[in-house]
Image: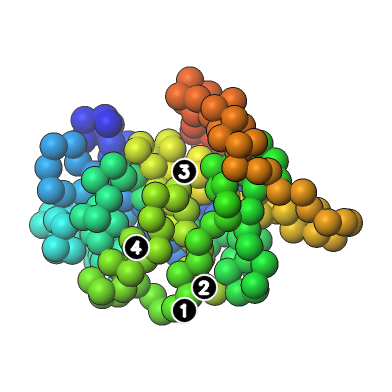
Amino acid sequence: MAHTPQLRKDIVSACRILSQQKLVEGFGHVSARIPNSQRFVMTPRISLALVKEKDLLTVNLKGEVIEGSQPAPSETWLHAALMKAKPKVHAIARIHARVANMFSVTDRKLEPVHNHGSFFANGVPVFQRPDLITTAELGAAVAARLGDKPAVLLRGNGQVTVGRTIPEAVMMAIYLEEAAEILYGALQIGTPIPLTTDESAQRRIEALPPVDLERAWNFFKSRVESD
């Protein structure tokens, strides 16, 4: 993971990318673990399209803001609980992708049918309570529902994606909505054919090895930097 100055720049880039991709509109937040510490940096209660480095907050695993003057998101506990429960998670994107949201309010599982969807093998778990994640207990419940998956749907209330890096968490957000869009489209014209567990495993190897993850991140970052 990058040193803190680069980490802060990457969080702002993530905010711009998620906004440009319309995965957040007015709401949502991003966080990243500070290496070798019990703290993380996260966006404040500001639209992600408007967040600047000076606005970022430093938060501990108790959900307490220890640096920064902007108000914290009401769902700070979501990030604190995930960071505490998942040591391998170093970045979190809290988004409101519209097509993926449809699958959180129906009995249809969001499962992979194409290469980039392979990260969501065997379906994306759904946290069934429609509440905002504003307590330690709710945060812990979301972390348990996430398990070892890269994403969880919050019933009628958006999604959470995680990663070992900020680019990975962002690409999981992008690919989650892509998987939802392709599955939704397939349902309109026929019976979708989900990838098997073995097919998903092979596709994951091919779809986003570290060099291609960086390639995808750099592409999306270049688009927001040129705006």
Question: What residue is shown with label 3?
Answer: 170
In terms of sequence position, does the residue under pointer 4 or pointer 2 come before the other?
A: 4
Q: Cα distance, mark 4 to mark 2?
A: 15 Å
Kind of residue indicated by mark 1: Pro
- Image location of residue 121, percent across then percent down: 57, 47
- Image location of residue 47, percent across then percent down: 42, 60
Question: What residue is shown with label 4?
Answer: 144
Question: What residue is shown with label 2?
Answer: 155
Q: Cα distance, mark 3 to mark 2?
A: 20 Å
Question: What residue is shown with label 1?
Answer: 130
In terms of sequence position, does the residue under pointer 2 or pointer 1 come before the other?
A: 1
The foreground one among 190 and 12 is: 190
100 lies left or right of 4: right
Q: How crowded is mark 2: few (under 14 residues within 10 Å), some or many (20 or more)?
A: some
- Image location of residue 193, percent across then percent down: 77, 49
Q: Which mark lies nearer to you, 1 or 3?
A: 1
* Quarter that holds the N terminus: top left
28 lies left or right of 58: right
In terms of sequence position, does the residue under pointer 3 or pointer 2 come before the other?
A: 2
- SS at circle 4: helix
